[in-house]
Image (cartoon, helix red, strand yellow):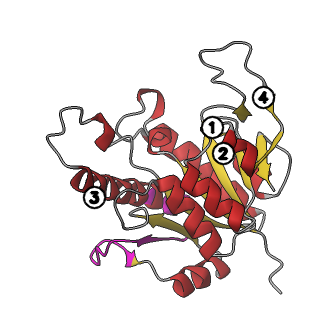
Amino acid sequence: MRKTRRVLLKLSGESLGGRATRGIDSESLQRIAAQVKRAIARGVQIGVVVGGGNIWRGALDRGHAIGRVTADYMGMLATVINALALQDALEDLGVQTRVQTAIEISKLAEAYIRRRAIRHLEKGRVVIFAGGTGNPYFTTDTAAALRAVEIEADVLLKATQVDGVYDDDPRTNPKAKKLERVTFMDAIRRRLRVMDTTALTLCMENRMPIAVFDLAVPGNIAKAAAGKRVGTWITE
């Protein structure tokens, strides 16, 4: 029986963009890589799914000059760019890393193969899953839920810009209350905007707990990966 803790870390593309939330900010990239290395040093196996919103968001195409399917594929390519950047940052710190993509780009990364991904994790390598699910109409949150279930992770770590889940948007409502723990059904019913409904449902059906925490706090990734109480936990 596997004893080593295995987690799936979901990073937004905006987290790589720094304060501007656009493009790739070197300092933000290095801070994230350092946090991942800290967790790896504690013996945790880490898979990563990264978004692409810092480079491309199809939803911003208000004029509909680009169709939804094309826009989604463009978003998948943006996640590949972010994955390659994160791979270099991690390897610069001495962390062996592999990028696997849901859409084949053989000159840049491996194609996603579940068994190969698990083998990399068992060897102590970080595996970055790029290209979303490989299909339009699905978010990278759903891709994170899917990969977490496929690699048999112990928990899905959702790194955000706030310190957990609130009953309302804390940026617009100063009276919003932080929830220490919430069930999947409550998150879906109350539309708490943690992840999209498809991702939450997939995690609920496969009993995959989700930890939502503030990425900006140093050491939070390692703490959450170790199962310590940080942010908000979404469970059955």
Pick the front one: 10 or 125: 10
Pointer 3 or 1: first along the chain: 3
Compared to residue 211, the image places residue 76 above or below, namely below
Residue 176 position, x and y percent, is 73, 20
Q: Name the residue under label 1.
A: 191
Asked if the residue at tag 4 contacts the one at tag 3, i.e. Cβ–Cβ closer than 8 Å, the answer is no
Q: Name the residue under label 2.
A: 188
Q: Quadrant of residue 162?
A: top right
The amino acid at mark 1 is Arg
Q: Mark 4 points at which residue?
A: 178
The amino acid at mark 4 is Lys
Pointer 3 or 4: first along the chain: 3
- The residue segment tinted magenta is 88-110
> Which tag is nearer the camera, tag 3 or tag 1?
1
**Label 3: how many Cα within 10 Å (few below 14, some 14–19, many 20+):** some
Residue 91 position, x and y percent, is 50, 63
The amino acid at mark 2 is Ile
Q: How far apart are marks 2 and 1 (CA)?
A: 5 Å
Label drawn at residue 73: 3
Give the residue at x 54% y 49%.
11
Residue 108 position, x and y percent, is 31, 71
**Label 2: how many Cα within 10 Å (few below 14, some 14–19, many 20+):** some
